[in-house]
Image (cartoon, helix red, strand yellow):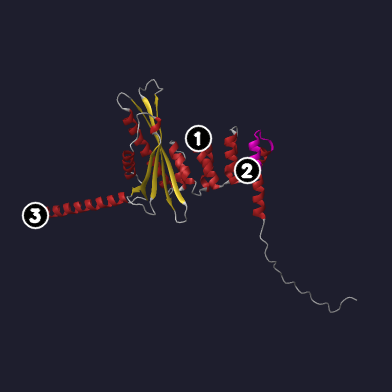
Amino acid sequence: MIRLFLQLARKALRLLVLLGLVATVACNQTQKTKSQQVIIFGLEDRASSAHKGVKFDIEQTQSVLKDAITESRQLELVDQENQDAFRVEMIITLASERESTHPDETGVYRAVQVDLTLFKWLSDHEKEKLTAQGKAFLVQDPKEVERQEGFEQVLLLAIKQAVELVDLQFETRRLPGERLKQLLKSERAEDRLYVLRTLRDRHEPKLVPNVVEMLFDSDTEVAMEAVGVLVAQKDQRAVPGLIRMAQGRDPIFLLQIITALSEIRGPVARGYLFTLAAGHDSAEIRKQASTVLKRFEQQQKTDTKKPEGKAVAFPRQQQPKDKNPAK
């Protein structure tokens, strides 16, 4: 009995070991199976010149970027370029330092911004492109954290955030509309921004009212991205919101709204542009509105003009002959 028990125990142990190996292999395969291949194509430091004594090391920065991509949920780093791989370019665009303004905080604010771009050429000679900005800051005690080291710590956080936002963009492409609707209400402005960027390329009519609400988002960048989404959707339900958004704004902003309305069109947009052309204080606004109205008229003529076709002759019904014609 004991011998039988030992034999069963050994078999069970071997089975557990085998299952463990299978699970490990499956886990490794899952980790390797990522949706997007990328290759680092270029890094540039435009921020170091703004601060004396700070110089970001390109090789070290590339190593940090590689680590962030390796930890990514969507990106797989490859060594050789191929037609399916995105090229990754990153620019360190900003490094700033200022004293803390809060009495409870001792130290300085150190901030870094990086711009991450992914692109690849498609078969029809068009470029697929994604962009993400990583922005990070830390309050550091200059007596404990030397400036160079401090900025490198913040750079690490900025790079990780940029890669995370790229992950978000790839993931939202596959999410159903209801889930995107929830993400548009995220407390993080970055989430709202990059979900909107995804909607530029997706036709989601049910989400148009939600995007219209984003025109009045507390984050200016999010609000302007919402304008871009509505222009891409060309849904006339967006026009009243765009008009309301333009109220009391400066002429430069109003010119942007006029451009947006010129893409969406419709009777409400035409009426608003007629009002601007007839009586706005700015001559530039009146001129631009008039130009767009003329373009509307030309487009309407083009749309209503139908190509001439051959006339179709229907046979006449032959009238019976009168056997007794009237004299």
Please tell me whether residue 135 belongs to the stretch shown in magenta.
Answer: no
Residue denoted by label 2: 269
Where does the image place residue 126, in percent across and percent down from the top left?
47, 52
Q: Residue 3 carries which label?
A: 3
Q: What residue type is labelled 2?
A: Ala
Magenta range: 278-292
Does residue 158 appear in this view? yes
Please tell me whether residue 283 belongs to the stretch shown in magenta.
Answer: yes
Foreground: disc 1 or disc 3: 1
Q: What residue type is labelled 3?
A: Arg
Query: How far apart are the two marked residues, 1 and 2, measured between alpha carbons?
Result: 23 Å
Left or right of 110 on screen, residue 252 = right
Residue denoted by label 1: 220
Which comes before the other along the chain, label 2 or label 3? 3
Where does the image place residue 1, in percent across and percent down from the top left?
9, 54
Which comes before the other along the chain, label 1 or label 2? 1
Numbered label tally: 3
